[in-house]
Amino acid sequence: MKNLTQIPILDLSAEVDELWDELNAAIRRVLRSSQFIMGPEVTEFEQRVAQYLDVKHAVALNSGTDALIIALRALGVGSGDEVITSPFTFFATAEAISLVGAQPVFVDIDPQTFNIDPNQIEAALTPRTKVILPVHLYGNPAPLEAILSIAQKYGLRVLEDCAQSFGARYVGEQGGQPQRFTGTLGDLGAFSFFPSKNLGAYGDGGMLVTNDDRLAEQARMLRTHGSRKKYYNEMIGYNSRLDTLQAAILLVKLPHLERYNQARRAIAQRYNELLKDLEGLLTPQLTPGHVFHQYTVRILNGRRDAVQARLAQRGVGTMVYYPVPLHRLPVYKHLNLRLPESERAAAEVLSLPIWPQMSHSTQDAVVEALREALP
Ligand SMILES: *Cc1c(COP(=O)(O)O)cnc(C)c1O
Protein backbone atom coordinates (compact mmCIF):
# COMPACT_ATOMS: atom_id res chain seq x y z
CA MET A 1 0.00 0.00 0.00
CA LYS A 2 1.19 3.48 -0.81
CA ASN A 3 2.25 5.42 2.22
CA LEU A 4 0.28 8.63 1.82
CA THR A 5 0.83 11.67 3.96
CA GLN A 6 -1.67 12.14 6.76
CA ILE A 7 -4.57 14.38 5.80
CA PRO A 8 -6.64 15.63 8.72
CA ILE A 9 -10.36 16.39 8.32
CA LEU A 10 -9.58 19.96 9.37
CA ASP A 11 -6.23 21.79 9.55
CA LEU A 12 -6.49 24.85 11.81
CA SER A 13 -2.74 25.50 11.69
CA ALA A 14 -2.90 26.91 8.14
CA GLU A 15 -5.06 29.78 9.37
CA VAL A 16 -2.90 30.44 12.43
CA ASP A 17 0.15 30.68 10.15
CA GLU A 18 -1.67 33.07 7.83
CA LEU A 19 -2.86 35.40 10.63
CA TRP A 20 0.06 34.90 13.04
CA ASP A 21 1.21 38.53 13.38
CA GLU A 22 -2.29 39.99 13.66
CA LEU A 23 -3.28 37.35 16.23
CA ASN A 24 -0.19 37.97 18.32
CA ALA A 25 -0.72 41.73 18.32
CA ALA A 26 -4.36 41.30 19.35
CA ILE A 27 -3.56 38.89 22.16
CA ARG A 28 -0.80 41.16 23.47
CA ARG A 29 -3.15 44.14 23.53
CA VAL A 30 -5.54 42.23 25.78
CA LEU A 31 -2.72 41.05 28.07
CA ARG A 32 -1.50 44.65 28.44
CA SER A 33 -5.02 45.96 29.15
CA SER A 34 -5.82 43.43 31.92
CA GLN A 35 -9.50 43.71 30.92
CA PHE A 36 -10.05 40.00 30.61
CA ILE A 37 -13.80 40.05 31.30
CA MET A 38 -16.06 42.20 29.10
CA GLY A 39 -13.17 44.29 27.80
CA PRO A 40 -13.71 46.71 24.91
CA GLU A 41 -12.99 43.97 22.33
CA VAL A 42 -16.21 42.17 23.35
CA THR A 43 -18.39 45.18 22.56
CA GLU A 44 -16.44 45.89 19.39
CA PHE A 45 -16.86 42.30 18.24
CA GLU A 46 -20.61 42.47 18.93
CA GLN A 47 -20.86 45.66 16.88
CA ARG A 48 -18.84 44.27 14.00
CA VAL A 49 -20.89 41.08 13.82
CA ALA A 50 -24.17 43.05 13.95
CA GLN A 51 -22.86 45.21 11.11
CA TYR A 52 -21.70 42.24 9.02
CA LEU A 53 -24.92 40.26 9.48
CA ASP A 54 -27.07 43.40 9.20
CA VAL A 55 -28.92 42.71 12.44
CA LYS A 56 -29.80 45.08 15.28
CA HIS A 57 -28.32 43.23 18.26
CA ALA A 58 -25.48 40.78 18.83
CA VAL A 59 -24.86 39.37 22.32
CA ALA A 60 -21.52 37.60 22.81
CA LEU A 61 -21.71 34.49 24.99
CA ASN A 62 -19.58 31.67 26.33
CA SER A 63 -20.65 28.94 23.86
CA GLY A 64 -23.14 27.95 21.20
CA THR A 65 -24.85 25.68 23.70
CA ASP A 66 -25.34 28.61 26.08
CA ALA A 67 -26.63 30.69 23.15
CA LEU A 68 -29.37 28.10 22.57
CA ILE A 69 -30.24 27.85 26.28
CA ILE A 70 -30.31 31.61 26.76
CA ALA A 71 -32.36 32.08 23.58
CA LEU A 72 -34.98 29.61 24.80
CA ARG A 73 -35.06 31.30 28.22
CA ALA A 74 -35.40 34.74 26.59
CA LEU A 75 -38.33 33.37 24.57
CA GLY A 76 -39.93 32.23 27.82
CA VAL A 77 -39.75 28.53 26.98
CA GLY A 78 -39.94 26.25 29.99
CA SER A 79 -41.63 23.31 31.63
CA GLY A 80 -44.61 21.95 29.68
CA ASP A 81 -43.58 23.59 26.41
CA GLU A 82 -42.61 21.79 23.22
CA VAL A 83 -39.96 22.79 20.71
CA ILE A 84 -39.88 21.36 17.19
CA THR A 85 -36.39 20.47 15.96
CA SER A 86 -34.32 18.11 13.83
CA PRO A 87 -33.02 14.81 15.24
CA PHE A 88 -30.06 14.99 12.83
CA THR A 89 -27.87 17.54 14.58
CA PHE A 90 -25.33 17.89 17.38
CA PHE A 91 -26.73 16.88 20.78
CA ALA A 92 -26.61 20.45 22.14
CA THR A 93 -29.60 21.48 20.00
CA ALA A 94 -31.95 19.14 21.88
CA GLU A 95 -30.00 19.30 25.13
CA ALA A 96 -30.73 23.03 25.38
CA ILE A 97 -34.46 22.35 24.99
CA SER A 98 -34.37 19.71 27.72
CA LEU A 99 -32.24 21.89 30.01
CA VAL A 100 -34.86 24.66 30.11
CA GLY A 101 -37.45 22.03 31.08
CA ALA A 102 -39.17 21.77 27.71
CA GLN A 103 -39.67 18.78 25.42
CA PRO A 104 -37.90 18.38 22.08
CA VAL A 105 -40.25 17.19 19.33
CA PHE A 106 -38.20 15.63 16.56
CA VAL A 107 -39.32 16.01 12.94
CA ASP A 108 -37.57 13.98 10.24
CA ILE A 109 -35.20 15.51 7.67
CA ASP A 110 -35.31 16.11 3.94
CA PRO A 111 -32.84 13.55 2.51
CA GLN A 112 -31.60 16.05 -0.10
CA THR A 113 -30.52 18.72 2.37
CA PHE A 114 -30.17 16.88 5.73
CA ASN A 115 -32.24 19.74 7.22
CA ILE A 116 -35.66 19.53 8.89
CA ASP A 117 -38.43 18.70 6.39
CA PRO A 118 -40.87 21.61 6.56
CA ASN A 119 -43.67 19.46 5.10
CA GLN A 120 -43.71 17.35 8.27
CA ILE A 121 -43.76 20.19 10.80
CA GLU A 122 -47.49 20.93 10.93
CA ALA A 123 -48.32 17.30 11.82
CA ALA A 124 -46.04 17.60 14.86
CA LEU A 125 -47.64 20.74 16.31
CA THR A 126 -49.64 20.56 19.55
CA PRO A 127 -51.17 23.26 21.77
CA ARG A 128 -47.91 23.13 23.76
CA THR A 129 -45.64 23.96 20.79
CA LYS A 130 -43.86 27.29 21.39
CA VAL A 131 -40.84 27.38 19.11
CA ILE A 132 -39.49 25.89 15.88
CA LEU A 133 -35.71 25.37 16.09
CA PRO A 134 -34.24 24.65 12.64
CA VAL A 135 -30.54 23.79 12.30
CA HIS A 136 -28.57 24.96 9.25
CA LEU A 137 -26.67 21.68 9.15
CA TYR A 138 -23.21 21.54 7.57
CA GLY A 139 -23.61 25.26 6.71
CA ASN A 140 -26.59 24.65 4.40
CA PRO A 141 -29.48 27.09 5.06
CA ALA A 142 -32.65 25.35 6.28
CA PRO A 143 -35.93 26.16 4.42
CA LEU A 144 -36.70 29.30 6.40
CA GLU A 145 -39.47 30.64 4.19
CA ALA A 146 -41.65 27.58 4.81
CA ILE A 147 -40.71 27.48 8.51
CA LEU A 148 -41.44 31.17 9.06
CA SER A 149 -44.81 30.90 7.36
CA ILE A 150 -45.82 27.98 9.61
CA ALA A 151 -44.60 29.97 12.63
CA GLN A 152 -46.65 32.97 11.58
CA LYS A 153 -49.76 30.89 10.95
CA TYR A 154 -49.66 29.29 14.42
CA GLY A 155 -48.12 32.13 16.43
CA LEU A 156 -44.83 30.34 17.11
CA ARG A 157 -41.32 31.77 17.53
CA VAL A 158 -38.33 30.68 15.45
CA LEU A 159 -34.84 30.12 16.89
CA GLU A 160 -32.18 29.32 14.28
CA ASP A 161 -29.26 27.07 15.27
CA CYS A 162 -26.49 28.73 13.22
CA ALA A 163 -23.58 26.96 14.94
CA GLN A 164 -22.47 25.60 11.55
CA SER A 165 -23.65 28.44 9.32
CA PHE A 166 -21.83 31.69 10.14
CA GLY A 167 -21.86 33.69 6.91
CA ALA A 168 -24.43 31.49 5.13
CA ARG A 169 -27.06 33.49 3.25
CA TYR A 170 -30.63 32.38 2.83
CA VAL A 171 -32.00 32.63 -0.66
CA GLY A 172 -35.81 32.45 -0.85
CA GLU A 173 -37.50 29.43 -2.41
CA GLN A 174 -38.40 31.48 -5.50
CA GLY A 175 -34.88 32.96 -5.60
CA GLY A 176 -34.84 36.65 -6.41
CA GLN A 177 -35.62 38.19 -3.03
CA PRO A 178 -32.89 39.97 -1.08
CA GLN A 179 -30.41 37.62 0.52
CA ARG A 180 -30.24 37.72 4.29
CA PHE A 181 -27.82 35.92 6.57
CA THR A 182 -28.98 32.85 8.46
CA GLY A 183 -29.69 33.83 12.04
CA THR A 184 -31.36 37.12 11.12
CA LEU A 185 -34.67 35.84 9.70
CA GLY A 186 -36.05 34.05 12.77
CA ASP A 187 -36.65 35.69 16.16
CA LEU A 188 -33.14 34.75 17.29
CA GLY A 189 -30.01 33.21 15.77
CA ALA A 190 -27.61 31.17 17.91
CA PHE A 191 -23.97 30.93 16.83
CA SER A 192 -20.99 28.92 18.10
CA PHE A 193 -17.34 29.92 17.91
CA PHE A 194 -16.05 26.45 18.81
CA PRO A 195 -12.61 26.28 17.13
CA SER A 196 -13.71 24.04 14.24
CA LYS A 197 -16.68 26.22 13.21
CA ASN A 198 -16.46 28.49 10.15
CA LEU A 199 -15.77 31.42 12.45
CA GLY A 200 -13.89 29.71 15.27
CA ALA A 201 -12.28 31.10 18.42
CA TYR A 202 -9.29 29.47 20.11
CA GLY A 203 -11.50 28.16 22.89
CA ASP A 204 -15.23 28.24 23.53
CA GLY A 205 -17.47 31.06 22.42
CA GLY A 206 -20.97 31.78 21.18
CA MET A 207 -23.41 34.53 20.27
CA LEU A 208 -27.06 35.41 19.92
CA VAL A 209 -28.33 37.83 17.31
CA THR A 210 -31.80 39.37 17.06
CA ASN A 211 -33.68 42.37 15.72
CA ASP A 212 -35.93 42.34 18.81
CA ASP A 213 -34.94 44.88 21.50
CA ARG A 214 -36.68 43.01 24.32
CA LEU A 215 -35.11 39.63 23.45
CA ALA A 216 -31.67 41.25 23.25
CA GLU A 217 -32.15 42.83 26.68
CA GLN A 218 -33.26 39.49 28.17
CA ALA A 219 -30.24 37.75 26.64
CA ARG A 220 -27.86 40.38 28.06
CA MET A 221 -29.37 39.97 31.53
CA LEU A 222 -29.29 36.17 31.40
CA ARG A 223 -25.62 36.34 30.31
CA THR A 224 -24.64 38.00 33.60
CA HIS A 225 -26.54 36.25 36.40
CA GLY A 226 -29.89 37.77 35.46
CA SER A 227 -28.78 41.30 36.24
CA ARG A 228 -28.78 44.61 34.40
CA LYS A 229 -26.90 46.27 37.22
CA LYS A 230 -24.25 44.44 39.24
CA TYR A 231 -25.60 42.94 42.49
CA TYR A 232 -29.21 43.84 41.58
CA ASN A 233 -30.10 40.43 40.14
CA GLU A 234 -33.61 40.22 38.75
CA MET A 235 -33.80 36.56 37.70
CA ILE A 236 -31.86 33.31 37.75
CA GLY A 237 -29.33 33.56 34.94
CA TYR A 238 -25.92 32.27 33.95
CA ASN A 239 -22.27 33.22 33.83
CA SER A 240 -21.90 33.10 30.07
CA ARG A 241 -19.68 35.93 28.89
CA LEU A 242 -17.34 35.64 25.93
CA ASP A 243 -13.71 36.08 27.09
CA THR A 244 -12.06 39.31 25.94
CA LEU A 245 -9.16 37.24 24.56
CA GLN A 246 -11.52 35.23 22.38
CA ALA A 247 -13.28 38.41 21.21
CA ALA A 248 -9.89 39.88 20.22
CA ILE A 249 -9.05 36.72 18.25
CA LEU A 250 -12.46 36.69 16.57
CA LEU A 251 -12.04 40.37 15.62
CA VAL A 252 -8.89 39.39 13.72
CA LYS A 253 -10.65 36.54 11.97
CA LEU A 254 -14.00 38.15 11.07
CA PRO A 255 -12.69 40.27 8.15
CA HIS A 256 -11.35 37.10 6.50
CA LEU A 257 -14.52 35.05 6.89
CA GLU A 258 -16.18 35.94 3.60
CA ARG A 259 -13.05 34.89 1.68
CA TYR A 260 -12.73 31.69 3.74
CA ASN A 261 -16.35 30.75 3.09
CA GLN A 262 -15.87 31.39 -0.64
CA ALA A 263 -12.84 29.09 -0.54
CA ARG A 264 -14.92 26.38 1.16
CA ARG A 265 -17.55 26.65 -1.58
CA ALA A 266 -14.89 26.39 -4.29
CA ILE A 267 -13.43 23.27 -2.66
CA ALA A 268 -16.92 21.73 -2.37
CA GLN A 269 -17.64 22.47 -6.02
CA ARG A 270 -14.32 20.88 -7.04
CA TYR A 271 -15.06 17.80 -4.89
CA ASN A 272 -18.46 17.50 -6.60
CA GLU A 273 -16.79 17.52 -10.02
CA LEU A 274 -14.02 15.09 -9.07
CA LEU A 275 -16.43 12.67 -7.38
CA LYS A 276 -19.36 12.80 -9.76
CA ASP A 277 -18.50 9.58 -11.59
CA LEU A 278 -17.80 7.48 -8.49
CA GLU A 279 -20.35 4.74 -7.93
CA GLY A 280 -21.83 4.07 -4.53
CA LEU A 281 -21.34 7.69 -3.48
CA LEU A 282 -23.70 10.68 -3.56
CA THR A 283 -22.31 14.22 -3.49
CA PRO A 284 -24.08 17.13 -1.73
CA GLN A 285 -26.02 19.83 -3.56
CA LEU A 286 -24.18 23.11 -4.04
CA THR A 287 -27.17 25.15 -2.88
CA PRO A 288 -26.95 28.97 -2.96
CA GLY A 289 -25.67 30.42 0.30
CA HIS A 290 -24.21 27.11 1.57
CA VAL A 291 -20.90 27.70 3.42
CA PHE A 292 -19.80 24.06 3.72
CA HIS A 293 -18.88 23.86 7.38
CA GLN A 294 -18.73 20.19 6.38
CA TYR A 295 -18.47 18.60 2.98
CA THR A 296 -20.61 15.52 3.50
CA VAL A 297 -21.24 12.69 1.04
CA ARG A 298 -23.43 9.62 1.34
CA ILE A 299 -21.74 6.21 0.99
CA LEU A 300 -24.42 3.80 -0.23
CA ASN A 301 -25.02 0.06 0.06
CA GLY A 302 -24.06 -0.26 3.73
CA ARG A 303 -20.40 0.44 2.91
CA ARG A 304 -19.88 3.62 4.95
CA ASP A 305 -17.97 2.19 7.90
CA ALA A 306 -15.77 0.04 5.66
CA VAL A 307 -14.95 3.01 3.41
CA GLN A 308 -14.15 5.18 6.42
CA ALA A 309 -11.82 2.49 7.80
CA ARG A 310 -10.03 2.16 4.45
CA LEU A 311 -9.60 5.93 4.21
CA ALA A 312 -8.11 5.92 7.72
CA GLN A 313 -5.62 3.24 6.61
CA ARG A 314 -4.63 5.54 3.76
CA GLY A 315 -4.09 8.41 6.19
CA VAL A 316 -7.25 10.37 5.32
CA GLY A 317 -9.24 11.70 8.29
CA THR A 318 -13.03 11.70 7.99
CA MET A 319 -15.88 12.05 10.46
CA VAL A 320 -19.45 10.86 10.78
CA TYR A 321 -21.72 13.76 11.71
CA TYR A 322 -23.75 12.18 13.27
CA PRO A 323 -23.69 8.41 13.85
CA VAL A 324 -26.79 8.30 16.10
CA PRO A 325 -29.85 10.46 15.43
CA LEU A 326 -30.88 12.12 18.67
CA HIS A 327 -34.15 10.18 19.05
CA ARG A 328 -32.11 6.96 19.27
CA LEU A 329 -29.79 8.19 22.04
CA PRO A 330 -30.40 6.84 25.57
CA VAL A 331 -31.96 10.07 26.88
CA TYR A 332 -34.55 10.30 24.09
CA LYS A 333 -35.07 6.60 23.27
CA HIS A 334 -38.23 6.48 25.38
CA LEU A 335 -39.93 8.72 22.80
CA ASN A 336 -40.07 5.59 20.61
CA LEU A 337 -39.76 7.45 17.34
CA ARG A 338 -39.05 6.06 13.89
CA LEU A 339 -37.62 8.79 11.69
CA PRO A 340 -36.38 6.83 8.68
CA GLU A 341 -34.54 9.57 6.78
CA SER A 342 -32.53 10.61 9.84
CA GLU A 343 -31.70 6.99 10.57
CA ARG A 344 -30.63 6.36 6.97
CA ALA A 345 -28.51 9.53 6.93
CA ALA A 346 -26.80 8.50 10.18
CA ALA A 347 -25.81 5.22 8.52
CA GLU A 348 -24.63 6.76 5.23
CA VAL A 349 -23.03 10.17 5.82
CA LEU A 350 -19.29 10.73 5.71
CA SER A 351 -17.66 14.15 6.03
CA LEU A 352 -14.45 14.60 4.04
CA PRO A 353 -11.49 16.91 4.76
CA ILE A 354 -12.24 20.57 4.07
CA TRP A 355 -10.72 23.83 5.26
CA PRO A 356 -10.27 27.16 3.47
CA GLN A 357 -6.54 26.77 2.78
CA MET A 358 -6.77 23.15 1.57
CA SER A 359 -4.66 22.77 -1.59
CA HIS A 360 -5.74 21.13 -4.82
CA SER A 361 -3.04 18.48 -4.42
CA THR A 362 -4.29 17.58 -0.92
CA GLN A 363 -7.82 17.39 -2.26
CA ASP A 364 -6.65 15.22 -5.18
CA ALA A 365 -5.04 12.85 -2.67
CA VAL A 366 -8.35 12.56 -0.77
CA VAL A 367 -10.22 11.80 -4.01
CA GLU A 368 -7.59 9.24 -5.04
CA ALA A 369 -7.86 7.49 -1.65
CA LEU A 370 -11.65 7.51 -1.90
CA ARG A 371 -11.48 5.99 -5.38
CA GLU A 372 -9.38 3.15 -3.96
CA ALA A 373 -11.53 2.76 -0.84
CA LEU A 374 -14.83 2.37 -2.68
CA PRO A 375 -15.67 -1.17 -3.82
C1 LIG B 1 -21.26 23.13 17.68
C2 LIG B 1 -22.72 23.07 17.72
C3 LIG B 1 -23.48 23.50 18.83
C4 LIG B 1 -22.85 23.84 20.15
O1 LIG B 1 -21.90 24.83 20.13
P1 LIG B 1 -20.79 24.90 21.29
O2 LIG B 1 -20.15 26.22 21.07
O3 LIG B 1 -19.87 23.76 21.11
O4 LIG B 1 -21.51 24.84 22.60
C5 LIG B 1 -24.85 23.50 18.73
N1 LIG B 1 -25.48 23.10 17.63
C6 LIG B 1 -24.81 22.65 16.54
C7 LIG B 1 -25.57 22.25 15.33
C8 LIG B 1 -23.41 22.62 16.56
O5 LIG B 1 -22.75 22.16 15.49
Image (cartoon, rainbow, N blue to C red):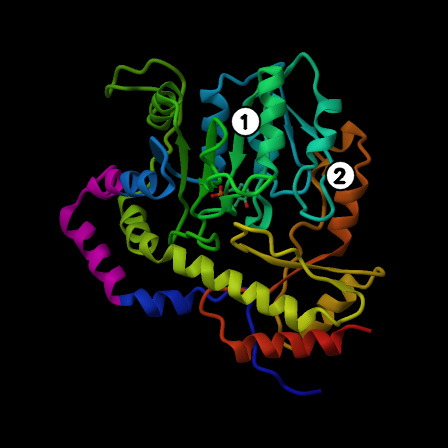
Q: Residue furthest front?
A: 176
The image position of residue 11, as x and y in percent, is: 48, 67
User: Which residue is labeled 1 in the image?
Assistant: 158
Which residues are drawn in magenta?
A: 21-44
Please tell me the numbered disc located at residue 328.
Answer: 2
Q: Quadrant of the C terminus?
A: bottom right
Q: Does the magenta stretch include residue 306?
A: no
Q: Residue at x 75, y 43 (%)?
A: 342
Classify 10 Å Cα crowding around label 2: few (below 14), some (14-19), many (20 and above): some
Q: Identify the amino acid type marked 1.
A: Val
Q: Which residue lies furthest to the left in this view?
A: 32
Q: Quadrant of the N terminus?
A: bottom right
Above or below, 227 relative to 300: above
Q: Can residue 181 be spotted in the picture?
A: yes
The image position of residue 340, as x and y in percent, is: 81, 41
Q: Which residue is drawn at 63% across and 31% down?
A: 146
Q: Can residue 81 be spotted in the picture?
A: no
Q: Measure the alpha-carbon separation of dots 2 and 1.
A: 25 Å
* Residue 142, quarter of the rendered image: top right
State how many labels appear. Answer: 2
Asked which secondary structure carries label 1, the reply is strand
The image position of residue 312, as x and y in percent, is: 67, 71
Magenta stretch, overall SS: helix
Above or below, 176 relative to 269: above
Q: Identify the amino acid type marked 2.
A: Arg
Mark 2 / mark 1, whichever is N-terminal: 1
The reply to whether the C-beta atoms of the residues labelled 2 and 1 are less than 8 Å apart is no
Q: Which of marks 2 and 1 is in front?
A: 1
Q: Residue furthest right?
A: 301
Asked which secondary structure carries label 2, the reply is helix
Q: Does the magenta stretch include residue 33?
A: yes
Above or below, 103 relative to 128: below
